[in-house]
Amino acid sequence: MYKKKIGSRNYYYLRASKRLNNKQVTKDIAYLGSTIEEARKNLPLIVKNKQEIKKSYRKIKLLLETEYYNNKIKKLKLKKDNFLNDNLENIEASKLHYNKVFQKLNQKSREEILEDFVIEFAYNTTSLEGNTITLEEAKNFFETGRTPKDRTLREIYDLQNTKNTLFWLLAQKKNLSNNLIIEIHKRLMENVDERIGYRTKDIRVFKSHFEASSGIYVKTDMDLLLKWYNENKKKLHPFVLATIFHHKFEKVHPFSDGNGRVGRLMITLYLVEKGILKKPILYLSDFFEKNRDLYYLNLTKVRKQNDIDQWFKFFLVGVIETAKSSINTFDKILKLQKEVDEKLQKLGSRTNNARTIIAYLYQRPLINANKVKEVTGISMPSAYKLIAALENLDILKEITGGQRRKQYWFYDYINIFK
């Protein structure tokens, strides 16, 4: 997308470039409009008639949406933040865009997405600490109760505890305190580590190569951290507070094990509490996992060189990239819902039962004939016929390869989260 400014007016074009005779040739292929609102309205109409831009539609749409929400935030003329500077508008635009798209989804879809994102949060945050269970194994475990092969009980409890603790915290309305932090740790470490509560002995942190608080000062340092938090929670932007708090918490390293998991869980919940997120479905653990070395390197730089600016930049990139990724996921889900419903209308009298199955699959994207019978109340022969019909429509995909006890994935939905 290209924006041309003539006088005080902007004009939006779609521009394509290709190599021709060893030269890069650029040309405008479509005019979108003179305002971002016109461009957003015209893009879907232009795509229908321009085969060459269909492949880039999602990227172009995201650019237009980003520009639209950036403009809305600029009109608010926000008060300058000394920590965030020009990044404040980017954060607020990402927040507005993210929450607006999420609100377009119906209540059932929001609940389904929350469930999936919590599973992914559990996978990513435990993976950062060395858990070897894959994302597909994690989803299968939570959906069927079947434990993955060749994985330790510690890893399974680690994953299960993280998901359960996050849902437990959502139901709580407690102020941040030593007792709450210790309770979070206790729930995360159940059947994983017996060392519950603040440590009283010194430890060495190998991944980040820094000296954590001495054991005899952990409680004092946590008291000071919470005092700082309470004094600044109304003064600092929530993003700034979460960024600094995470660094300070990890510097204290109050527990013998599980500090990273507790710290990352508190980031998500604090942003929900302050209204930055409508639900805890923007989880930075995925970004931290993909940039694991940079995560530990930037934490170390703050501790050793007091380079808080670099930590802010890293954290900021994580928030914006994760928000854009989540927005893209929401769009894909809305598109899939529309496509699946159009397919189901071909089933005639079986459409209503098929919709009942699809509603179930959005919550648990794995199913078998017995579950189809249970969910719909139809006979077993009818259940097999309905499954066959959904297979023919490319909605279900058989994954077991056997003649009996076949299992079926809602494959396109699973693919969205891969």
Image (cartoon, helix red, strand yellow):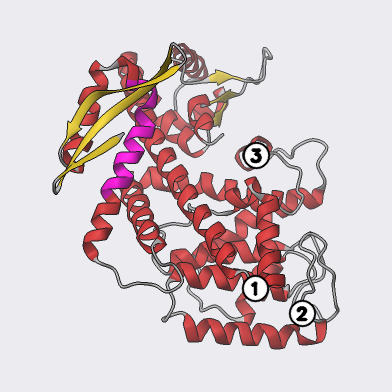
* Quarter of the image where one finds residue 370: top right
Q: Closer to the observer: label 1 or label 2?
A: 1
* The one of 28 and 189 positioned closer to us in this rendering: 28
Q: Which residue is mark 3?
A: 135
Expressed as whole percent of the image width and height from the top left, the position of residue 200 reads 82, 81
Location of residue 318 with respect to 138 vertically, above or below: below
The magenta region covers 53-68
54 in magenta: yes
- Mark 3 vs mark 1, CA separation in Å: 35 Å
Q: Which residue is mark 2?
A: 213
Location of residue 28 with respect to 126 vertically, above or below: above
Q: What amino acid is labelled 3 in the image?
A: Leu
* The one of 406 and 239 positioned closer to us in this rendering: 239
Apparent side of residue 126 relative to residue 102 in the rendered image (left or right): right
Q: Which residue is mark 1?
A: 306
Q: Closer to the observer: label 2 or label 3?
A: 2
Quarter of the image with the N terminus is top left
Residue 187 in view here: no
- For residue 9, the mark is none
Q: Earlier in the sequence, mark 2 or mark 3?
A: 3
* The one of 241 and 230 positioned closer to us in this rendering: 241
Q: What amino acid is labelled 1 in the image?
A: Asn
